[in-house]
Amino acid sequence: MARRQTRREMLKTVLGGGVATALGGSVFGAGRASRRAQTDAGESIELGGGVFVVRVPGQANVVARADADGVLLVDGGSAEGSERVLAAVDGVAGDGPVHTLFNTHWHPEQTGSNVRLGGEGATIIAQENTRLWLTTDVTWPWNGRRFEPLPEIGQPNRTFYDVGGDLPSGVRYGYIPDAAHTDGDLYVHFPEENVLAVGDAVSGDGWPVVDWWTGGWIGGIVGGIERLIALADAETRIVPARGPVLGLTDLEEQYEMYGVIYSRLSQLLNSGRGPDEAVDARPTEEYDARMGNPDEFVRRAFESQWAYLSPDA
Ligand SMILES: [Zn+2]
């Protein structure tokens, strides 16, 4: 676990524990999807310029873009859903080969088409920490769920550390080093189409999963959203791994909300409270009616602060 310690130390330094919560009062309108396509496998929405969000029931969102060489994908669904996801992609983006697959992070809901597409010769792009998690056993301590490494053919074959890059098609990608969800989160930006795919760094569907075992934490949720806001404008369509397409206003609301929750959890931690007491303190109270039962999120978010901020962590 030496690598995780190192990242944790680095983030402590970078973040310094301070989170700005002041927001301007500007009003932004979320962009609207322009076209929808029903296929047997689910619903796809065109976001403009041939970029689609492909939504297959039970699967995380996938973003697809067709070009002269074939198809670029951001995430590929789970192993169980791979066939349906790729059929739905064919339905909107044509049946050209998937030449490029981004992994927004290592979770199996995103990397289930890696083996198949890697075997067909796709370039699989990920942040290096994502590749490392996909080469090792991972067991979540909170529920015992165990993840096996991917076969080598399915592992990312083009990785980067801090600086992402531009593809010849104009598509940009970059690291979200705040560790919003894991320590390997990346975004993919389609500047021409004004679409930003953000994986699980932003949740569009209830409270987020805080995977602190592979580096995510509540301070990173705040920092990650702030970073993504800086990439967006009032018309940007922001595609999270779960839930509907979001706009800038949604990110600004989330930034404010998680900033409030982060500072409350910090106070609880600094006054020596534990996870049970954090849940009992109801630090998300005014948001629960909209967001749902917060107990698991609060517990995990509190544990994530322990992991990052405790002097002996
Ligand atoms: Zn995830």
Image (cartoon, grey):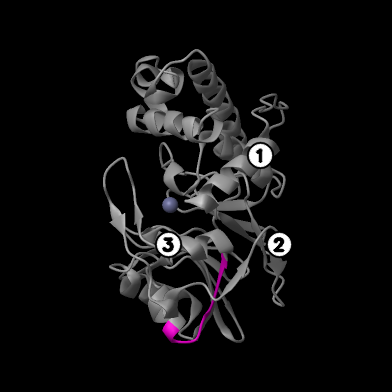
Between the residue at mark 1 and the residue at mark 3, the CA separation in whole angstroms equals 23 Å
| Residue 124 seen in the current view | yes
- Residue 18: mark: none
Q: Is mark 3 within 8 Å of ligand 1?
A: yes
Say which of marks 3 and 2 sits in front. 3
Query: In the structure shown, which secondary structural element does the residue marked by tag 1 occupy?
Result: helix
| Marked residue nearer the N-terminal end (1 or 3) | 3
Residue at 31% across / 67% down in the picture? 81
Q: Are marks 2 and 1 in contact (CB under 8 Å)?
A: no
**Residue underneath mark 3:** 110
Amino acid type assigned to the residue bearing label 1 in the image: Glu
x, y percentage for residue 177?
A: 63, 49
Evaluate if marks 3 and 2 touch, with contact meaning CB atoms under 8 Å apart. Answer: no
Q: Nearer the viewer, mark 2 or mark 1?
A: 1
Q: Nearer the viewer, residue 247 or 77?
A: 77
Sequence-earlier tag: 2 or 1: 2
- Give the Cα distance between marks 2 and 1: 18 Å
Return the residue nearer the eye: 257 or 105: 105
Q: Which residue is mark 2?
A: 191
Residue 18 falls within the magenta-colored stretch = no
Q: Position of residue 294 (x, y in %)?
A: 36, 28
